[in-house]
Image (tube, coloured by chain):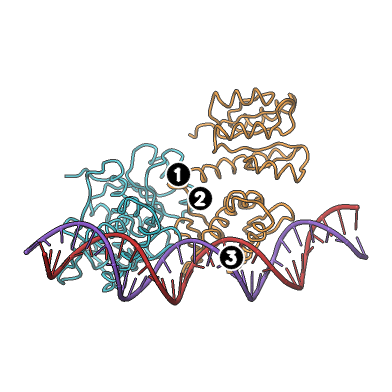
Chain colours: A cyan, B orange, C red, D purple
Amino acid sequence: METAKKILLVEDDPNFGAILKDYLMLNDFEVTHAKNGMEGFEKFKKDTYDLCILDVMMPYKDGYTLAREIREKNQDVPIVFLTAKSMKEDVLKGYKVGADDYLNKPFDSEVLLMKIKAIIQRKSAETKPDSTVFEFTIGKFHLNSKLRQLSFDGQEPSKLSPKECELLKMLALHVDDVMPRELALTKIWRDDNYFTSRSMDVYIAKLRKYLKPDENVEILNIHGEGFRLVIKK
Amino acid sequence: METAKKILLVEDDPNFGAILKDYLMLNDFEVTHAKNGMEGFEKFKKDTYDLCILDVMMPYKDGYTLAREIREKNQDVPIVFLTAKSMKEDVLKGYKVGADDYLNKPFDSEVLLMKIKAIIQRKSAETKPDSTVFEFTIGKFHLNSKLRQLSFDGQEPSKLSPKECELLKMLALHVDDVMPRELALTKIWRDDNYFTSRSMDVYIAKLRKYLKPDENVEILNIHGEGFRLVIKK
DNA sequence: ATATATATTAACCAAACATTAACAAAATGA
DNA sequence: TCATTTTGTTAATGTTTGGTTAATATATAT
């Protein structure tokens, strides 16, 4: 049994804040909710967290300013910004739809949850490389990187080759964020040159083919930087 | 409570030096005052500072020489030059040596303070590129310099090229203040000549186009100096 | 050993990005 | 004022990076 990861949630909208907190707690996180930037910083100093979720738009002290203060104290905690619309609306929509029993219904925005998990996982992989997660939800897909199986809906799972699997896993660990080209090359190909880079491009094409069935899942390129696995919703 | 920022002040004029030191200390900085370049370098080696303020004109060892020595030991400390006149060549030389900003003597103490604070913050954003600040609010825009996207209101974000992104980020780090031409050229183009300068102008034009949707956001030119990102309100 | 799966290399094209050129318009200073 | 420098802008050109497919090479399993 893992010990629960601690999250500092700074969100001024009491409604949304409460819902998100519940949702996160339901997913086995320990959540501290601060109602504004000041309170957020106070709470941050008093404890150690595995992740900070900051609302960007807050009166008096916005998320970025708070992020800077947090960074001065701690260079390592992952920080996730809640940028209004997308996530918030989705979560609230999920709440309204579910009405009395929203807690039982999966939210539309499992994206946020995935992002959170990926970030925490990535971080813990840096410190203790052995404890590695091998199951990922990618839109309507499910990846088991140990069995190297990618399943879609109820269908027969596809078998992935070692490289395909490692690459997809690394993308999943960076959901919604950049997976730098260089990182994949050095970690998976253990070499970074013209040819390995081209080889990687070939694998990206293969993965795109696998992921085609779910039109909400996409691998985007950030020119000269790397790739980004996004789950639209 | 924040821990006081440490400033190394190297100024040969004892009068002016003492006054400046007092003023800075009054504003909660911890100040070490060295009377000449030699002493300045000795003190620099013995401690770590958040900022160095160097007089350009000093006997024995001038500010530039000292700056170069400091840079050899430390690539990150912000360095600000104090100069009586604002000779163009001096400014250029300053940036080449690795200066972060320039202050003309005499100056408004309020302005000085603002600048110092801005520089320290800016630097902390620059030096921790991975873990730190990559989100900026620019009027109604929102820049994510990691994903290189600029979003406006609720619209689909624009994708920025590496150069576009770096330049906009640098402007944002200097909001309401001049971003000196030479600084952008040396840091982003890593070369300062006629062609890179023209290239930069082209990029400024591109950024202006991106920023058009918000009429409160503007990139102004300061003839012969640089550019200024302003957010009217 | 041979089929099969996996991985790399090649070749070609398209897209993204950056620089250069050319000319117009401002700003500056003698 | 006029000559000079700096900046604004657009388009043309050059360069790098990525998408794609297929051919070749390498590894693996039967």
Tell me the crowding category of disc 3: few under 14, some 14 to 19, or many 20 or more residues within 10 angstroms, Cα based.
Answer: many
Element at label 3: helix
Type of amino acid under label 2: Tyr
The kind of secondary structure element at disc 1 is helix
Q: What residue would you read off at disc 3?
A: B211
Say which mark, if any, is on residue A38.
1
**Front label number (1 vs 3):** 3
Name the residue carrying label 2.
A60
Residue at 63 percent across and 56 percent down: it is: B229
Q: Are marks 2 and 1 on the same chain?
A: yes
**Residues at discs 1 and 3 in contact (Cβ within 8 Å):** no
> Measured along the vertical axis of the image, is residue A43 above or below residue D4?
above
Q: Position of residue A226 (x, y in %)?
A: 40, 59
Task: Determine the chain carrying the residue at label 3.
Answer: B
Q: Quadrant of residue D25?
A: bottom left
Q: Nearer the viewer, residue B35 or A223?
A: A223
Q: Which mark is residue A105?
A: none
Q: CA distance from mark 3 to mark 2?
A: 25 Å
The x and y percentages for residue A60 are 50, 50
In three-dimensional space, the C-alpha distance between marks 2 and 1, rounded to whole angstroms, equals 9 Å
| Label 2–label 1 contact, CB within 8 A | yes
Of residues A1 and A195, which is closer to you in this image? Answer: A195
Check the residue under mark 1 and report the chain it is in: A
Crowding at mark 1 (Cα within 10 Å: few <14, some 14-19, many 20+): some
The residue type indicated by label 3 comes to Leu
